[in-house]
Amino acid sequence: MGPGDREAVLVRVAYFSPMPPESSGIADYSALLLPALRERVDVTVAKRGTKRPPRSTDLAVYHIGNDPKAHGWILDALRRAPGLVVMHDFVLHHLVAGVTIGRRDGHGYLDAMERGYGVVGRLLAHGVLDKRLPPLWEARPEEFPLAGEVLELATGLVVHSRYVEERARGAGFTRPIARIAHPAWPDPGVEPAAIAGQPLIGAFGNVNQSKRVPQLLEAFARLRAEHPGAQLLLVGATSPGFDLERRLQRLGLGEGGIVREGYVDERRLWELMAACDVHVSLRSPTMGETSGTAIRALTLGKPLVVSATGWFAELPDAVALRVAVGDGEVTDLTAALRLLAERPDAREAMGVAARALARAEHDLANVAERQVAAFERVAGGEAVADEVVREVSEAAAGVGIAPGTAEAAEIARRLAEVDLGG
């Protein structure tokens, strides 16, 4: 299909997503992706609070994440007009709690838990409402993802990881799923912030338990005992109830070694990230999320240390050292930090691989093309899928790619990732 052909049948998309200036990673994602999508489809961005897509819409695309403030209104719209869901998190318990308990609708929460998990689910929900149990979205989110309603309403899914794809299929979702990488930002070419550290290790995002900050602090304290020039840069708001200062004092980090910044704007974020020698992105439990800061680290050519969970576990060995959660986590994390502190050659090799991965798997234009193919598939059904496969096959034959070759196998793999071609 040439540019003129696509223009003649341009799909009209109603696009429901948080957008800047909201402080949301998904808002940043959409701000990055939308210009590339607009080159390929007719996109109308829904204003916050819009209740349903315009009647002229061919496809409504709903970006669903776990934050009820950012996505509650989008879930409301999805309930009125089902459409394709870009599923940024698989665990949606906090979202469901926000649009039920957060709106003084305890019965809605009881019903949601019963639909998902039967009588036991309803009893657990009663325990939460009666404050006899801690909130399940904090204590046991992976056991009770509450993704069922979104999966029932979605006419197709776009996901960013095998983890979310497998969880969706495991939950019984049978409609099309397109697994498409998170797009990479272009390198903005900023000057690195002037922060000392040999090495400087950066961790970005809310400072809390789920980002494994207690484990990171303990591992860093062990590293700094051997490498007193090391510095740990923590960037992001401290979550309520997380006593960072007490932890730092207990580990002997209260008088040095830690550089602290709260929430920062986009330019400052890039400056701080560019200054770091190593990026740490830990997560457990995982909601099935993809880390925008980890994607930025790839763009900048920075080595990563990540938890061996969810999307993070899918990062190639060449760009990330993975640390298992649980027993031995601090020891393994210390070893990973020590290796990168003592081996600048390893940091350099991982950085080169990171940039290559950002340019290939996370290329913005490629991601936009694949998302548009998914939009067209869901908007047009099987007829569009068959036509896309036919056109790709003809184009491949036209440049001498024969069936059964390695090139043909790669094309088939790519089509399969967007549920095209069988």
Image (cartoon, rainbow, N blue to C red):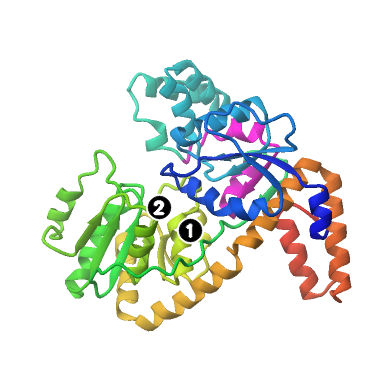
Q: Residue 145, can we see it?
A: yes
Q: How many marks?
A: 2
| Mark carried by residue 283 | 2
Which residue is at a point 21% across and 67% down the rendered structure image?
222
- Provide the residue designation for mark 1: 312
Instruction: Identify the magenta region.
Output: 142-170
The C terminus sits in image quarter: bottom right
- Mark closest to the chain's N terminus, 2 or 1: 2
The residue lying toward the viewer, choosing from 199 and 334, is 199
Residue 246 drawn at (x, y percent): 15, 49
**Residue 115 appears left or right of 415:** left
The residue lying toward the viewer, choosing from 150 and 223, is 150
The secondary structure type at the circle numbered 1 is helix
Which residue is at a point 46% across and 55% down the rendered structure image?
292
| Mark carried by residue 292 | none
Instruction: Answer few, some or many: residues within 10 Å of disc 2's Cα (few below 14, many 20 plus, some between 14 and 19).
Output: many
Amino acid found under the numbered disc labelled 2: Arg
Q: Are marks 2 and 1 in contact (CB under 8 Å)?
A: yes
Residue 124 drawn at (x, y percent): 43, 25
Kindly indicate the quadrant of the structure image that contains residue 266. Answer: bottom left
